[in-house]
Image (cartoon, grey):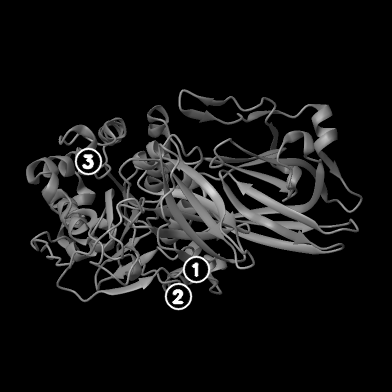
């Protein structure tokens, strides 16, 4: 299909970002409009060979804290009425120039083609699967650029000779994504789906959420997401096979396969309802899901973090993001189930009282569920009520509290006191709570169909920990650990966690590369920021071996001895 046969508009970002206002960062707003004759002349032209020459301008602004990163692209928008279906786009790029052209492509919110270099004289066909969450799918093509502000961005050109699209039969999306042959024509899609690790006759319960649900590697034990143990309350009489998801898009994706049903935990820390979509993780989940499957959706922990702009979703916008998940599930015959956010152990900052965590977001999830008539497990209220019942000290056995030396071979050898994340016992308490609630839920045919697979009889057992107490320097940060290291676009993103130090006004985090002779400051964290965030995100250039450490800084300017040193390769 000729690119000019698509609906074409122009998207630009003419106004500067509003910036920070009352604790929230406001980026530039996109302006989408019909193309004038002048726009047409500036952005689109046909070559003698019939290819379409497309102009674009890219620059990436980073707000002052360094955690809000916003790529802005002035470019044409190609629109196609796809409906809420799975489809395959094939783009044919050409390059009549003398230099290579690095091309990129957005499909709606997701970057599907990234920094693909088209050599001079080359003709390259590139395909990707888009599981649309909009009735109309929008494509934007642009060239890579390192500009950090609009004034430095250059107008660059790429060439497209064809854009084709075809809807895919059920099961084919996962098969193509897994690289299995034959799925493209739709014949034998069930066989191809099976090759991709998907049984078309066996239901799957998918979990999409954050670090309170995520599956963790043994090094981080006892840290456990409730999604990591939820399978224990799903057909517990059957043997289970635990493996990484076949698409291996990120290592936290685990499949817990029973004989008659599977649980697939695709939750990952530091993500919100916004960023899970923007990063393509929802698209990847939809590729693997089929009609009759279930998706348990728990959001709010990171949506509520206004100091992290790329993930923040204000309560007023939360409804809209939830609806993207709900409508894209319903259109495919997938059953969405909302789970309100598990409460924090927040009694320390509220004079011993447990206050409902993320109340605005919880209320919004309940309202949306009632309006759309979909199941909702109110874990937020149930977990908060349970914490009130057992009290603040017992609550530590549910959350990531453990003394130094309890787990000497793991990430928390120095101990940890974390009121947000769960340890194994707490994860099982809440996983059972969810299963029990679903078993008792009435009024939903899809939940009735799920009940035969659920069993909440097993009561979690709390493990007693005995540790020989050792002298501890109270000024030195303990519990220093690294989490969720990811490398993307030559940048390493990771989370650090450590215990609060009494009397500290700030903390200095240091890093040392393999060729450095000393540690250099990575960033300073205020005591207030540390208290309001369970984990703290950091970025560093990739392709090196690093060491990191942290010190506490006190009101008199004194700096403590450093924590233990963590070494990692990025």
Q: Are marks 2 and 1 in contact (CB under 8 Å)?
A: yes
Give the percent coordinates (x, y) of residue 336.
Answer: 32, 47
Which residue position is annotated with label 3?
A: 380
Q: Residue at x 31, y 65 (%)?
A: 413
Q: Tag 3, which secondary structure?
A: helix
Q: Secondary structure at mark 2?
A: helix
Residue 195 disc label: 2
Residue at position x 44%, y 63% in the image: 565
**Is residue 508 something one can see in this rendering?**
yes
Q: Say whether residue 200 is left or right of residue 461.
A: right
Q: Nearer the viewer, mark 3 or mark 1?
A: 3
Residue 146: % across, % down = 73, 47
Q: Are marks 3 and 2 in contact (CB under 8 Å)?
A: no
> Does the CB distance between marks 3 and 1 fall below 8 Å?
no
Give whichever of discs 3 and 1 has the lower sequence position.
Answer: 1
367 over 394 or under it: above or below: above
290 to 148, vertically: above or below? below
Image x and y of residue 211, in percent: 35, 53
Side (left or right) of 123 relative to 71: right
> Which element carries disc 1, helix, strand or loop?
helix
* Spatial CA span between label 2 and label 1: 7 Å
């Amino acid at each position: 299909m000729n690119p000019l046969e698509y609906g074409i508009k122009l998207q630009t970002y003419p106004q500067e970002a509003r910036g920070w206002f009352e604790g929230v960062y406001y980026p530039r707003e996109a302006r989408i409009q019909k193309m004038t004759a002048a726009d047409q002349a500036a952005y689109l032209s046909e070559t003698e060979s019939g290819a379409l020459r497309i102009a674009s301008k890219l620059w990436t602004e980073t707000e002052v804290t360094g955690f809000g990163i916003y790529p802005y692209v002035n470019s044409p928008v190609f629109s196609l009425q796809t409906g809420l279906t799975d489809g395959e786009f094939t783009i044919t790029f050409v390059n009549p120039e003398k230099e290579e052209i690095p091309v990129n492509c957005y499909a709606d919110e997701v970057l599907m083609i990234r920094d693909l270099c088209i050599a001079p004289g080359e003709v390259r066909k590139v395909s990707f699967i888009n599981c649309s969450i909009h009735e109309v799918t929008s494509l934007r093509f642009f060239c890579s650029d390192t500009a950090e502000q609009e004034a430095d961005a250059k107008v660059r050109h790429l060439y497209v000779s064809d854009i084709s699209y075809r809807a895919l039969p059920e099961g084919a999306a996962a098969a193509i994504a897994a690289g299995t042959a034959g799925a493209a024509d739709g014949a034998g899609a069930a066989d191809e789906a099976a090759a991709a690790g998907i049984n078309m006759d066996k239901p799957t319960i998918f979990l999409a959420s954050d670090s309170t649900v995520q599956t963790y590697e043994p090094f981080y034990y006892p840290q456990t997401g409730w999604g990591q143990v939820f399978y224990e309350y799903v057909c517990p009489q059957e043997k289970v096979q635990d493996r990484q998801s076949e698409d291996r898009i990120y290592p936290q994706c685990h499949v817990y396969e029973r004989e008659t049903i599977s649980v697939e935990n695709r939750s990952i820390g530091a993500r919100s309802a916004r960023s899970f979509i923007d990063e393509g993780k929802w698209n990847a989940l939809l590729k693997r899901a089929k009609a009759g499957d279930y998706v348990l959706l728990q959001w709010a922990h990171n949506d509520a973090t206004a100091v992290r702009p790329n993930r923040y979703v204000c309560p007023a916008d939360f409804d809209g993001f939830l609806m993207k998940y709900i409508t894209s599930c319903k259109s495919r015959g997938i059953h969405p189930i909302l789970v309100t956010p598990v409460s924090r152990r927040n009694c320390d900052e509220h004079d011993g009282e447990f206050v409902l965590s993320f109340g605005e977001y919880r209320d919004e999830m309940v309202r949306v569920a009632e309006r759309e008539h979909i199941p909702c497990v109110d874990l937020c209220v149930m977990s908060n009520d349970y914490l009130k019942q057992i009290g603040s000290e017992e609550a530590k056995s549910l959350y990531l509290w453990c003394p130094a030396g309890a787990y000497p071979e793991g990430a928390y050898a120095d101990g940890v006191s974390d009121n947000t994340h769960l340890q194994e016992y707490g994860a099982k308490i809440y996983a059972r709570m969810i299963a029990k609630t679903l078993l008792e839920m009435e009024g939903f045919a899809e939940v009735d169909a799920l009940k035969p697979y659920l069993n909440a009889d097993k009561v979690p057992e709390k493990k007693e920990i005995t540790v020989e107490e050792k002298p501890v320097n109270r000024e030195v940060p303990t519990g220093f650990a690294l989490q969720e290291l990811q490398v993307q676009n030559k940048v390493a993103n990771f989370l650090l966690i450590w215990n609060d130090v009494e009397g500290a006004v700030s903390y200095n985090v240091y890093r040392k590369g393999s060729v450095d002779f000393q540690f250099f400051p990575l960033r300073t964290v205020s005591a207030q920021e540390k208290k309001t965030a369970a984990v703290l995100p950091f970025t560093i250039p990739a392709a090196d071996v690093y060491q990191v450490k942290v010190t506490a800084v006190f009101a008199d300017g004194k700096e403590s001895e450093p924590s233990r040193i963590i070494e990692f390769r990025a």
